[in-house]
Image (cartoon, rainbow, N blue to C red):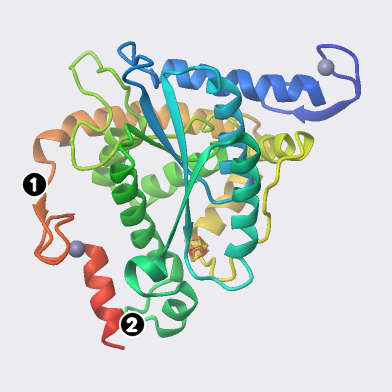
């Protein structure tokens, strides 16, 4: 097949758009969609100046998504003094997995001279995920623990680094899966919170709400959320980016796996499903958010660590207590 733009050999047929694209035109199209998302989300506010730049902390795992995100952001803002990029990686303590992906992170950031911070669960909490998965005092999936610890580390360090925004590499498939899961679980509060934390506009909507308004959490941004996973993977390969592809040995999100398969089949039979899920979900989430804002929980300080919580102890401290009692 030939590229619809230039006639060179196509590397991708995107069924949802009907386009065949060659290497160059695929990469250009990925970059264009990321730039448009950054613009549409108003990620870079007008009042950012070289004297008072925005600090964007990128959650860099070394997987293809966060590697592609870091690469495109670097190319886009390298010469723009209004944006400072900092990459933040987490070492969970998973043998045979994280060391390799951290090598990818180090290579990527060193080549581009991006500040890179690595934080480990061992230093932060005196735990390793390999042991957490083994002990499992709460009878949950490893990812359920890991997600709580990761959120805690990311938001505390993003805060310490003076982050204005926390950027993650979630792609269109990730986002459509999460949307469908939230919807199928019937969790409207979760949908509303997700909108305020990572979907709503920066710079205020018509009611004056801005992403991250609740003030408790650093607002999130996902500039790759319009790009299908396959295109992110192709981009990483074509640009020869150092990305680590092995799966975590504790990865056990069975329900997400089912949703993934379902979405894959739907997309095969009805190209464009992921895009339409997200278009509808964003509108629904906006409605849910405006409906739920008045009843959003009041955050107290955790007795142990001072982090935000609606009870006495935050979730992280509860889990750490349980792990210590093993
Ligand atoms: S797959 Fe689960 S356990 Fe492994 S790093 Fe990701 S969240 Fe943590
Ligand atoms: Zn082409
Ligand atoms: Zn706590």
Number of on-image labels: 2
The label number, if any, that marks residue 137 in the structure image: 2
Mark 1, residues whose alpha carbon is within 10 Å: few (<14), some, or many (≥20)?
few
Which quarter of the image is occupied by the C terminus? bottom left
Where's residue 14, x and y in %? Answer: 73, 28
Establish if 246 lies above or below 277. Answer: below
Name the secondary structure under disc 1: loop
Where's residue 156, x and y in %? Answer: 29, 50
- Residue at position x 35%, y 33% in the image: 165
Which quarter of the image is occupied by the N terminus? top right
- Residue at position x 55%, y 36% in the image: 172
- Residue at position x 26%, y 28% in the image: 287
Mark 2, residues whose alpha carbon is within 10 Å: few (<14), some, or many (≥20)?
some
Front one among 306 and 201: 306
Q: Is residue 82 left or right of residue 316?
A: right
Establish if 160 lies above or below 51. Answer: below
Q: Is residue 89 left or right of residue 31?
A: left
The label number, if any, that marks residue 298 in the structure image: 1
Residue 22 makes an appearance in the image: no
Mark with earlier residue (1, 2): 2
Quarter for ligand 3?
Answer: bottom left
- Residue at position x 57%, y 21% in the image: 76
């Amino acid at each position: 097949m030939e590229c619809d733009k230039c006639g060179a050999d196509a590397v991708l047929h995107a069924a949802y758009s009907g386009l065949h694209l060659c290497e160059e035109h695929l990469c250009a199209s990925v970059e264009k969609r990321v730039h448009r998302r950054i613009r549409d989300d108003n990620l870079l506010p007008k009042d950012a100046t070289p004297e008072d730049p925005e600090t964007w902390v990128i959650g860099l795992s070394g997987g293809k998504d966060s590697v592609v995100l870091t690469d495109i952001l670097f190319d886009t803002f390298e010469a723009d003094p209004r944006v400072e990029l900092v990459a933040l990686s987490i070492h969970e303590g998973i043998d045979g997995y994280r060391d390799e992906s951290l090598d990818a992170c180090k290579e990527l950031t060193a080549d581009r001279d991006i500040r890179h911070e690595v934080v480990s669960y061992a230093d932060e909490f005196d735990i390793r995920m390999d042991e957490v998965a083994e002990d499992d005092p709460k009878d949950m999936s490893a990812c359920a623990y890991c997600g709580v610890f990761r959120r805690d580390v990311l938001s505390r360090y993003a805060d310490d680094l003076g982050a204005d925004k926390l950027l993650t590499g979630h792609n269109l498939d990730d986002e459509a899966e999460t949307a469908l899961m939230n919807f199928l679980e019937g969790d409207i509060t979760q949908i509303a919170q997700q909108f305020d934390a990572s979907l709503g506009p920066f710079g205020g909507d018509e009611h004056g709400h801005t992403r991250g308004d609740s003030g408790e959490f650093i607002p999130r941004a996902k500039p790759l959320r319009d790009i299908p996973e396959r295109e992110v993977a192709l981009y990483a390969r074509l640009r020869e980016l150092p990305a680590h592809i092995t799966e975590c040995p504790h990865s056990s999100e069975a329900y997400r796996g089912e949703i993934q398969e379902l979405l894959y089949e739907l997309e095969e039979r009805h190209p464009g499903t992921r895009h339409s899920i997200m278009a509808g979900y964003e509108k629904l989430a906006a409605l849910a958010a405006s409906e739920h804002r008045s009843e959003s929980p009041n955050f107290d300080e955790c007795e142990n660590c001072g982090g935000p919580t609606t009870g006495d102890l935050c979730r992280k401290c509860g889990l750490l207590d349980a792990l210590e009692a093993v």
